[in-house]
Image: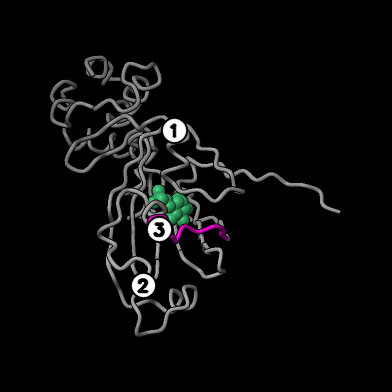
Amino acid sequence: FAMLKESSQSGAPLYLQLRKSIEEAVNRGLIGPGDALPSERDIASKADISRVTVRKAVQDLVKGGILVQRHGSGTFVAPRMERVEQSLSRLTSFTEDMARRGMVVRSAWLDRGLYAPSPDEMMVLGLSSSELVARVARLRIANDTPLAIERAAISASVLPDPEAIGSSLYAALELTGNRPVRAVQRISAANLGDGDARLLEVPPGVAGLHIERISYLASGKVIEFTRSIYRGDAYDFVAELRLTG
Ligand code: GLP
């Protein structure tokens, strides 16, 4: 930032100069993924520029995905994303997928409770309007990186107490003999809205993947109707294709 002070006569707007020097510091590894940026006030006083200028540069870098802001705790260099390669031919849970990769799984609850079902929940889960649906919405996090927002709907007769499920929905279903054995998964492109982008710590409007999973018990009964938003920059879905005659 001292360098910035010396070069501030160079003509380019100050916020652009600051943006460039932060970018350079990241590219040269002077500050690495996950490192905290000094506070706005510190940067402003060290570089002898206004906080408004600092904020403008920082916002630009957040939009560009170089920095991330965590509410209440500050601004950090964005974690370097290693893409997750996910098979499309096995019916696994998020917890199992991440554990297999040696990643530490965590979820932040967005919603869990019993509700009157929406028309599509009634249709997919075969519920009548007098029955209830258990909704379980979570931000799924692996190694401290938010990867997906998953909104699952399960019949309340199967999951009467959504508050009671632990960290894995499939583990909770397995305990009651309701682990799905087959699923149909539909993947489509989606641009992330502001709220989802904020939760996933990516700039709003970037590409995401909308994934719908309807899963079944061996009896053929639908057990799960989940709609998720996955980070487009974090996932490769891989399927093996065979020539059948
Ligand atoms: C995957 C699926 C979801 C499923 C979830 C269960 O992420 N896309 O449809 O609900 O796994 O994961 P867990 O058992 O970790 O809660």
Closer to the camera: disc 1 or disc 3? 3
Closer to the N terminus: mark 1 or mark 2?
Answer: 1
Residue 178 is covered by the magenta coloring: yes
Residue displayed at 27% across by 29% down: 14
Q: Secondary structure at mark 3?
A: helix
Disc 1 target residue = 81
- Mark 1 to mark 3 CA distance (whole Å): 31 Å
| First in sequence: mark 3 vs mark 2 | 2
Whether the residue under disc 3 has CB within 8 Å of ligand 1: yes
Instruction: Give the camera-side residue of 175 and 99.
Output: 175
Q: Could you tell me the amino acid type at mark 1?
A: Met
Q: Which residue is at the front of the view, 103 or 193?
A: 103
**As drawn, is 140 to the left or to the right of 161?**
right
Residue at position x 35%, y 80% from top?
Answer: 131
Q: Tell me which amino acid carries mark 2.
A: Ser
- Residue receiving disc 3: 173
Q: In which quadrant of the rendered image does the C terminus lie?
A: bottom right
